[in-house]
Image (tube, rainbow, N blue to C red):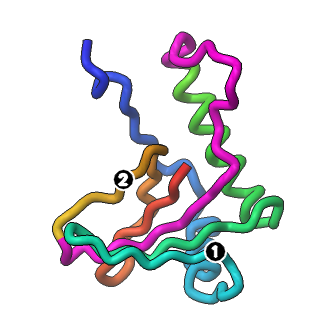
Amino acid sequence: MNLSDFIRGYTNVASDELIEEMFDWFYNSESVKTENPNRVTRKDLQKWVSVNTPLYNKIQEVKYNMLDKYLSEFPYAYRGTLKLESEETKIQRTDIHVVGFITSMQSNLITKMQDEYWFGLSI
């Protein structure tokens, strides 16, 4: 058994309305934590959704639903005392003309492709 045997991707976990709300927030929010890393392998624009905002709460619900699906398949995956969920929620845009991947220590929900960018929700 390999570590890759435990990687799962879940499709259609967020409604089209939530996806559109995330895009709108991403392009119109200005006073949030933002990073714009310029790496050799990719160029990103990353924005953190503020905790306990309506958008954050909707995204958290999606994250918990995915976690429940994962743990129903792998109930033995986590038996520790630390929290399994991250309280941070980051929405990331990555230029797809640059060779690279949307990755992080957390899993990523690839939500939709718009224009020339991939969007990922870091969970």
Task: Give the residue type at disc 1.
Answer: Lys
Between the C-alphas of marks 2 and 1, the distance is 19 Å
In this picture, residue 80 sits left or right of residue 116: right
Above or below residue 118? Residue 32 is below
Q: Residue at x 70, y 19 (%)?
A: 81
- In the shown orientation, is residue 98 left or right of residue 6? left
Q: Nearer the viewer, residue 9 or 39?
A: 39
Label 2 sits on residue: 103
Q: Residue under label 1, please give it.
A: 33
Q: Position of residue 93 (x, y in %)?
A: 42, 73
Query: Is 60 located above or below residue 68 in the figure?
Result: below
Query: How many numbered marks does the figure carry?
Result: 2
Q: Are marks 2 and 1 in contact (CB under 8 Å)?
A: no
Q: Quadrant of residue 43?
A: bottom left
7 or 65: nearer the viewer:
7
Q: Position of residue 33 (x, y in %)?
A: 64, 74
Span shown in magenta: 73-98
Q: Please identify the quarter of the rendering in which residue 15 is found.
A: bottom right
Q: Secondary structure under badge 2?
A: loop
Q: Residue at x 62, y 45 (%)?
A: 63
- Categorize mark 2 by other alpha carbons within 10 Å: few (<14), some (14-19), many (20+): few
Dot 1 alpha-carbon crowd within 10 angstroms: few under 14, some 14 to 19, many 20 or more = few
**Does the magenta stretch mainly form a helix, a strand or a loop?**
loop
The x and y percentages for residue 38 are 32, 77
1 vs 49: above or below:
above
- Amino acid type shown at disc 2: Thr
Give the image quarter of residue 7.
top left
Q: Answer with mark 2 or mark 1, whichever residue precedes in sequence.
A: 1
Residue 84 magenta: yes
